[in-house]
Image (cartoon, rainbow, N blue to C red):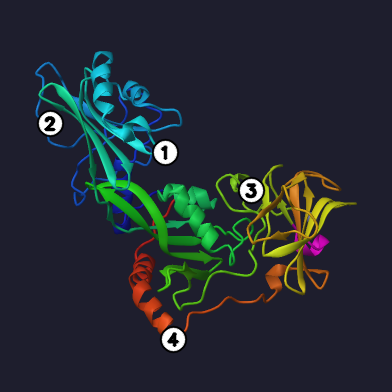
Amino acid sequence: MYRIHPVQHSTLRRRLWLPVMAALPFFGVMAAFGIDPGTVVEPVPTQTVVQPLDLPQPQATDTAESFDYWSEERIRRGDTLASLLQRMGVAEEEQASILAAGRASSALQRLAPGRSMLARVTSSGRLLLLRYLASDERLVTIERVQGEFVAEERAVRLEMRPIMRSAEIRSSLFAATDAADIPDSIASQLAEIFSGEIDFHRDLRRGDRLSVVYEAYYHDGRLVRTGRLLSAEFVNAGQAHRAVYYRDGQGREGYFTPHGQSLKRAFLKSPLPFSRISSGFTSARFHPVLQQWRAHRGIDYAAPTGTPVRAVADAVVAFAGWQNGYGNIVVLDHHKPYSTAYAHLSRFAPGVKKGRRVNQGDIIGYVGATGLATGPHLHYEFRVAGVQRDPQTLKLPIAFSLEGRERSRFLAQTQPYVARLELLRGSNLAAFD
Ligand SMILES: [Zn+2]
């Protein structure tokens, strides 16, 4: 189910700009490249990847041509201009002269994987225009001028316009962000920012809601890339967590509550990083926890063998080796009286040895099923003075807050993005199944 509300207009527009290309090798996608960004775009079904041109038909350059189209190709490792021309449907007989023109551009000689190339090609394979954004500041074009191809590189300025999106969780975080057309990089940033507050593997509930405001960079009205999360709200089990990005006078940056309290925590909520890959096993079962903490004084995370395990806080390795029952286990000493243990590992991360220092978030080992384990999972213990405790019930040290002038500066600078969150909350949430 898919309800339209004002916030989604940008969603719909992005579907036009960033269609899935790989599946359509020849005709590519007829993206409505060049549409005025203010144009009201009619809703398109979620699965649609091909959008007919609703531009005025370009002036025919050749009366024999019935139509032309824009083709976009994502650059893969090992790609050359020649391989892209091939994929974009440029006729063989044109390619040599295009490649010759392309030699004038160093950017076209060393293509950046992950970026994309756009070409306007006629139905008979004649290239009319090729555009390649080599970096956020450099645009390369190859154009047909009086029958000759001419390459040009020029500086461009990208325009940043924040995008606002909301979603409700029905099955998993990534299902929700996919449905709301929120890029993976933003979903991962969201999980990271709240990693001291929410264990995304265990705490997610059906009906949780998220709102995000993030940077989007445009050139000529076309989305070129997304940037950082500017503000976010995550309503988990009825409790709202909010974050806003702030860069202080000295250039230090981070995420804070709207009141100016840092979201950096001494302890991460989960030893498993949250990503599309690590969350794959949560989608089948909403709660991946095998047993309750009470049952055996630890938290079990079901996860495939090889899933990385991270240190929840800065620590010194107290033990890395074999213990009966636990199998391969790492024990970390944090500041007194806290320690944590990670058991049943398939292997240890390189350099994880007794006495070594690790930082919060460092990978210390990989999920396995060693010791007394019926299947691959991570057994995680949080210990206070050596005794296992349920971290959910503990009051852990809180992070610092911005004070005085810094706080005033913070409030002034972040206000617009907090206001956007309010706006999202006030609007009808998009509901996705
Ligand atoms: Zn266990």
The answer to whether the residue labelled 1 contacts the one labelled 3, judged by CB atoms less than 8 Å apart, is no
**Residue 42 in the image, given as x and y percentages of width and height:** 24, 45
Residue at mark 3: 285
Residue found at the far right of this picture: 324
- The reply, left or right, for residue 178 in relation to residue 147 is right
Real-space CA distance between mark 3 and mark 4, rounded to the nearest whole angstrom: 47 Å
Residue at mark 2: 58
Real-space CA distance between mark 1 and mark 4, rounded to the nearest whole angstrom: 44 Å
Whether residue 111 is in magenta: the answer is no
Secondary structure of the residue carrying tag 3 is loop
Residue 209 vs residue 262, the one in the foreground: 262
The crowding category of the residue bearing disc 4, from other C-alpha atoms within 10 Å (few below 14, some 14 to 19, many at least 20), is: few
Kindly tell me whether mark 3's CB lies below 8 Å from ligand 1: no
Q: Amino acid at mark 4?
A: Gly
Residue found at the far bottom of this picture: 404
In the displayed structure, 183 sits above or below 25; it is: below
Disc sitting over residue 114 in the figure: 1
Secondary structure of the residue carrying tag 2 is loop
Q: State which mark lies toward you, 3 or 4.
A: 4
